[in-house]
Amino acid sequence: MAKKVYLSSPHMGGYEMEYIKKAFDTNWIAPLGPNVDDFEKEVANYVGVKHATATSSGTAAIHLALKCLGIKKGDVVFCSTLTFAASCNPIIYQGADPVFIDSNYETWNMCSIALERAFNYAKKNNKMPKAVIVVNLYGQSADFDNIKKICDGYNVPIIEDAAESLGATYKGKQSGSIGDIGIYSFNGNKIITTSGGGILVSNNEEYVKKSKFWATQSRENERHYEHRELGFNYRISNVLAGIGIGQMKVLEERIKRKKKIYKTYEEEFKDIKDLQMMPIFDFGEPNYWLSAMTIKNDSKIKPIDLILALEDENIESRPVWKPMNSQPFYECYKFFSKEESFSVADDIFNRGVCLPSDTNMSDDDINKVVKIVKKIFDHDYKGDINNVKL
Ligand SMILES: *Cc1c(COP(=O)(O)O)cnc(C)c1O
C-alpha cells in the first residue's frame, strides 16, 4: 500500500523541541508559564492585534468570545452556515439561539445580502442579534467591508472565526484582526498546530483580561480559592504553547507551500470543464489552508466518485463542510439566504470536494493526485472507479 497522503496533517518545523525542552528544563509543565506568555505575544504581534489569550482549543476561544460580548440564555447570534460545527456549538453552550447566514459563490463566505435579510427580519420581530460570527473558510477571508458596514449600522459586534485562516489577509489586514474579537485554532489539521489549542485576540484589553479570568476557573485574586463567577478550564499548557512558538517560525513557509499546492491544482485542472477550484477573491491573499473545488451539476462525476477513487490510492480527500442549516441538530434554527428558497452553501456542499492540501506532501504526491483527478474527468471514464487505477 502506498504511503498515505493526508488532507492536512501536523507538520513540525524542527524548532518546536527547543521550547518544549525549555518547559521541561524549568519544570514549567503545569498550565501557564513563560511559553504561554511568549506565544500570546508572538501571535498578537504577527496579526497586529494588541492582546491575546491562548486557549486549549479554538472552540474554547469562541466560547470565551461570546462571553466577552455578554451572550446569554435567549440571545440571538448570527453565524456563517458553511463551517465546522465548532463555530456555532458555543452559541448553544451559552443557551443562545443561532441564526445561520448563507454563503456567496464569490468567496464561499458570508453573503452580505443574506446578512441584511436576516437583520431586516430580526428588526421587524424584535429579535436583534447580540453578535455575528463570521467564518473565513478554508483560509480565505470573508468580504468584510459590506459585512462590517451592516453590523456597524446595527451596532452589533463581530467575532471573526479565523480558525482556518491564520496568515491570510484582507485588504492588507491580517485575517482574524478585523472583527471585534478574532479566534484561531491550532488543532492538528490547521495550518500550524500545537497538537490542540487556540487563541483569542482583540484590541479590547478588557475582553482579553476577562477571557483569561474565565479560562482559569474564574479564580479571584485571593489566597484561598474564591469564585464569584462560573469558570472554565480553557487555558493552553506551557508545553503546548512551546510547540506553538516553534510553529510560528514556519507559518510563512507553510503558507507558501499551501499556495503552491493550490496553484498546481488550478493550473493542472484549468482545462477540465466540469471542475472549478474554489474562487480566490482579489481583496487579499488566502493562506490556502485547504484546496477545495466544485464539480458542475451536469457532470457525470459526483464528489463521491472522486473521493473514492483517491481513497483507492490511499489518498485522503473530503466533502466540503456540510452547512449548519442542514445539520439534524441545527435545522430547527432560522436560516437566511440571498434568495428565499435556494441555499448557496448547500449547493457548494453537494458539489464540493476538499483535495489533499498537506504540506507534508512531496511533489510526486501532488502529481499523483493530479493524475487521478485528470483521469477521472477524462471523457473515457465510464463511471467505474476501477478504471481510475494508475
Ligand atoms: C477547527 C475549527 C474550529 C475549532 O477549533 P478547535 O481548535 O478544533 O476547537 C472552529 N471553527 C472553524 C471554522 C474550524 O475550522
Image (spheres, rainbow, N blue to C red):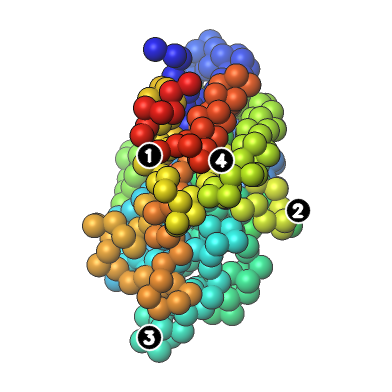
| Amino acid identity at mark 2 | Gly
Specify few, some or many for label 3: CA neighbours under 10 Å numbering under 14, 14-19, or 20 or more: few
Looking at the image, which residue is at 67% across and 56% down? 281
Q: Secondary structure at mark 2?
A: loop
Please rate how many residues cluster around mark 2, counting C-alpha atoms within 10 Å: few if below 14, some from 14 to 19, many from 20: few
- Identify residue type, mark 3: Asn
Structural distance between the alpha carbons of marks 2 and 3: 37 Å
Q: Which residue does the numbered mark 4 point to in the structure image? A: 291
- Tell me the distance, in whole angstroms, between the alpha carbons under discs 4 and 1: 24 Å
Residue for badge 3: 126
Q: Earlier in the sequence, mark 4 or mark 1?
A: 4
As drawn, 263 above or below 178: above
Please state the horizontal and vertical placement of residue 235, each as a whole percent of the image. Answer: 43, 37
Residue type, numbered disc 4? Ser
Q: In the rendered structure, which disc, 1 or 2, sits on the residue that comes first in sequence?
A: 2
In the drawing, what numbered circle is on residue 172?
Answer: 2
Task: Count how many numbered circles sit on residues in the image.
Answer: 4
Task: Tell me what residue is drawn at x 39 percent, y 12 percent.
Answer: 1
Towards the viewer: 300 or 308: 300
Amino acid type of the residue tagged 1 in the rendering: Gly
Tag nearer the camera, 2 or 3:
2
Residue for badge 1: 383
